[in-house]
Amino acid sequence: MLDFAVKVAERSHEIGEADFATLRALGMTDEEIWDIGAITALFALSNRMANLMALRPNDEFYLMGRAASAKPA
């Protein structure tokens, strides 16, 4: 599943029937495969757009998990 997600994000032009066959052999349905691809593509798009615009999350979100005692001003 993770190999497929990385391939969607980095090399989507290389995805072929063998990739789908591998996931189906692991018991995944076409709907589950679609979900993996759609979620991966959405995150790839949103991250690229954020990088393009040099967007930074608000201070509260940015500090989550980074500094336990730090609070935004």
Image (spheres, grey):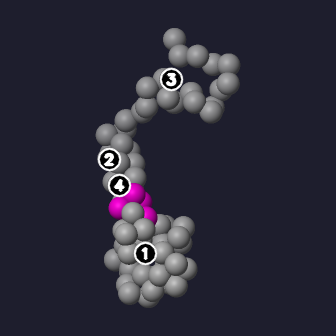
For residue 29, the mark is 1
| Farthest residue, direction top | 73
Q: Nearer the viewer, residue 1 or 63?
A: 1
Disc marking residue 42: 4
State which mark lies toward you, 1 or 2: 1
Amino acid type at circle 1 is Thr
Circles 1 and 4 in contact, beta carbons < 8 Å: no
Indicate whether 52 appears above or below 19: above
Q: Tell me the crowding category of disc 3: few under 14, some 14 to 19, or many 20 or more residues within 10 angstroms, Cα based.
A: few
Residue located beneath label 3 in the image: 60
* Camera-side mark, 3 or 2: 3
Tell me the distance, in whole angstroms, between the alpha carbons under discs 1 and 4: 20 Å
Q: Is residue 58 above or below residue 24?
A: above
Q: Secondary structure at mark 2?
A: helix
Expressed as whole percent of the image width and height from the top left, the position of residue 30 reads 38, 75
Of the image marks 1 and 4, the number of the one nearer the N terminus:
1
Of the pair 53 and 38, the residue shown nearer to us: 38
- The numbered mark at residue 70 is none
Give whichever of discs 1 and 2 has the lower sequence position: 1
Mark before the other along the chain sequence, 2 or 4? 4
- Indicate the position of residue 57 as horizontal and vertical percent values: 43, 31
Between the residue at mark 4 and the residue at mark 3, the CA separation in whole angstroms equals 23 Å
User: Pointer 2: what residue?
Assistant: 49
SS class, disc 3: helix
Task: Check disc 4 and report its element: helix, strand or loop.
Answer: helix
In the image shown, does 33 or 58 lie closer to the viewer?
Answer: 33
